[in-house]
Amino acid sequence: MSFLKTSTSFTRFRIKDTVPPALWGELVERLQKNAITDIDDLPEERSVGWTAFEDMLDTTFSGSPVEKGVYLAFSLRMDTRRVPPAVIKKYFALAMKKEEAANRDMGKKFVSRERKKELKEQVMLRLRSRFLPVPAEFQVIWNSSTGIVFFASTQSKMVETFQERFTHTFELDLEPLTPYELAASRLGDTAALDILEPTTFA
């Protein structure tokens, strides 16, 4: 998802740790080290990594600066190779028939569980090589002065993936800034919030 559209959904985070001053000079290097790896010619099912904010194909961050005033802008890209279940079912059935015919010729009556698992893995590898991965981009805006980070997604699995990748890259932990946490940060204390009772408007 993109912050450049007229509307978007996003999740807001707060950096829990104190950012080491040396990190700012290492920022681009860390992004490059953890940039996405293309899997077009690999049998991998998924690849996740950083790309440039303006160009999801730019993994060197040379096209435009990451720093934009007090903000840092980059993207998390996930390439996923999806093989339709019906296609898997068809080709696994074909592989099983071929295996069963070979077993009959050798006097065997059934295909073992281990062999079935092996056949399915072989089918998946062959099929993945015939399907191109689908890219998805999720933009990130990091306010370096406040420690607030905006991530252009609200999908729970994607948010979790982003948090893990962010922590792995920058060695900083993120805390989702929920309405409760936001109110607590404004008040400076959660005690006032905990004694509030909901208002009935009906």
Image (spheres, helix red, strand yellow):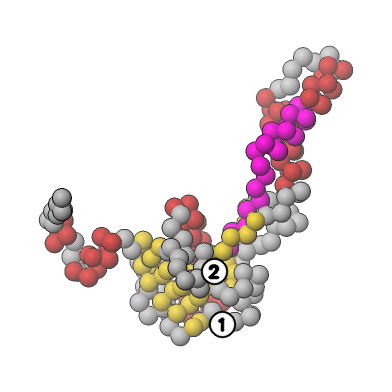
Q: Is residue 161 above or below residue 58?
A: above
Q: How far from the left and from the top, in percent, is residue 161?
A: 50, 56
The residue identified by callout 2 is 75
Q: In this view, does 187 lie above or below 67?
A: above
Tell me which residue sits at (24%, 68%) in the image.
Answer: 185
Dot label at residue 165: none
Q: Which residue lies furthest to the front in this view?
A: 202
Disc 1: which residue: 65
| C-beta proximity under 8 Å, tags 2 and 1 | no
Question: Disc 1 residue type?
Answer: Pro
- The verdict on residue 86 being magenta is yes
Q: In the image, what residue occupies the spot 61% across and 67% down?
A: 35
The x and y percentages for residue 195 are: 12, 56
The image position of residue 97, as x and y in percent, is 79, 24
Is the residue 65 above or below the residue 4 in the image? below
Q: Give the range drawn in magenta.
A: 76-96
Give, as a three-letter code, the residue at label 2.
Ser
Is any part of residue 41 visible from this angle?
yes
Secondary element type, mark 2: strand
Give whichever of 113, 198 is nearer the camera: 198
Kind of element beneath mark 1 = loop
Rate crowding at label 2 as few (under 14), some (14 to 19) or many (20 or more) other CA atoms within 10 Å: many
Left-right relation of 107 to 176: right
Q: Which of marks 2 and 1 is nearer the N terminus?
A: 1
* Residue 22 screen position, x and y as percent: 47, 79
Question: Is residue 44 inside the magenta stretch?
Answer: no
